[in-house]
């Protein structure tokens, strides 16, 4: 009897852990199969946050963010931008495939739109959705705003800034938060200036927060550039922004 009781407790613990983890979600963009991850609170009609991962695809930083957002009451869905079979194995491959989507921004916007549709199918309230993105995903967050995708706000976390000079500047209705590391060598002063000019010309409600003495991947604990103090502040800024735009 004691063994049965112990087994029952063990099974309950396992099931509870599984319910609190991230679950795979298979969806598609045309013929391309995609596999994202969603938090364990689907179907509960809550505000939703779409997470766009960095240039190597779904990583631990995106997973940790999703679980932290679930604790705040959000349904969080990590998008698969590249699709099954296309996950880069090194920086060279990551640069190539992310570069494709940066150049073909309409394809990037479409993948984000498909993921937003999936997030709503999973239970997110359609009028209470935001996008956050890291690095390449931060670029995507800004593309969601440029593409007028149905979101209330976007957060670009050490994302690529600016757009091609020949692209028109349209009205930007989503609220925008840019979390920018002061020593990000991947973003030039001209790109930053161009980004802010675009937001102003688009009439956006925007905010830029710059984090002192931080390199590009300052929020990622697995990076040598990780800055714990600034990463913690950036996360608090993200949560404050989400509280404003989704509640």
Image (tube, grey):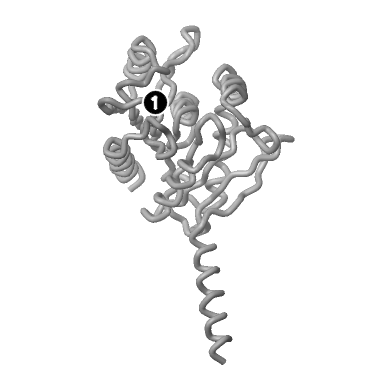
Q: Is residue 22 left or right of residue 175?
A: right
Q: Nearer the viewer, residue 219 or 175?
A: 219
Can the viewer see residue 241? no
- Residue visible at 32% across and 35% down in the picture: 227
| Place of residue 28 in the rendered image (x, y in percent of width and height, measured from the top left) | 67, 40
- Residue visible at 50% across and 68% down in the picture: 16
Can the viewer see residue 204? yes
Q: Nearer the viewer, residue 79 or 230?
A: 230
| Place of residue 183 in the rendered image (x, y in percent of width and height, measured from the top left) | 32, 21
Label 1 element class: loop
| Place of residue 109 in the rendered image (x, y in percent of width and height, measured from the top left) | 55, 28
Mark 1 = which residue? 216
Q: Is residue 16 left or right of residue 72?
A: right
Question: On the image, which quarter does residue 113 sit in?
Answer: top right
Residue located farthest toward the right when viewing the structure as drawn: 31
| Place of residue 64 in the rendered image (x, y in percent of width and height, measured from the top left) | 44, 47
Question: On the image, which quarter does residue 110 sit in?
Answer: top right
Q: Where's the N terminus, which quadrant? A: bottom right
């Amino acid at each position: 009897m004691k063994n049965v009781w112990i087994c029952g407790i063990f099974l309950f613990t396992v099931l509870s852990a599984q319910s609190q983890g991230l679950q795979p979600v298979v969806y598609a963009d045309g013929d391309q199969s995609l596999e994202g991850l969603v938090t364990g609170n689907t179907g509960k009609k809550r505000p939703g946050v779409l997470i766009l991962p960095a240039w190597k695809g779904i990583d631990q930083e995106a997973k940790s963010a999703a679980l932290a957002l679930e604790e705040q009451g959000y349904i969080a869905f990590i998008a698969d931008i590249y699709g099954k079979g296309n996950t880069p194995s090194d920086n060279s491959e990551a640069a190539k495939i992310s570069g494709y989507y940066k150049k073909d921004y309409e394809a990037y916007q479409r993948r984000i739109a498909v993921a937003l549709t999936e997030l709503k199918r999973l239970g997110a309230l359609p009028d209470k959705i935001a996008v956050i993105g890291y690095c390449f995903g931060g670029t995507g967050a800004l593309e969601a705003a440029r593409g007028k995708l149905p979101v209330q706000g976007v957060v670009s976390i050490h994302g690529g800034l600016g757009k091609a000079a020949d692209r028109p500047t349209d009205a930007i209705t989503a609220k925008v938060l840019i979390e920018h590391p002061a020593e990000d060598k991947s973003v030039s002063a001209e790109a930053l200036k161009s980004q802010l000019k675009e937001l102003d010309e688009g009439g956006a409600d925007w905010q830029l927060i710059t984090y002192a003495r931080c390199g590009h991947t300052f929020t990622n604990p697995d990076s040598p550039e990780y800055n714990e103090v600034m990463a913690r502040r950036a996360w608090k800024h993200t949560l404050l922004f989400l509280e404003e735009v989704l509640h």
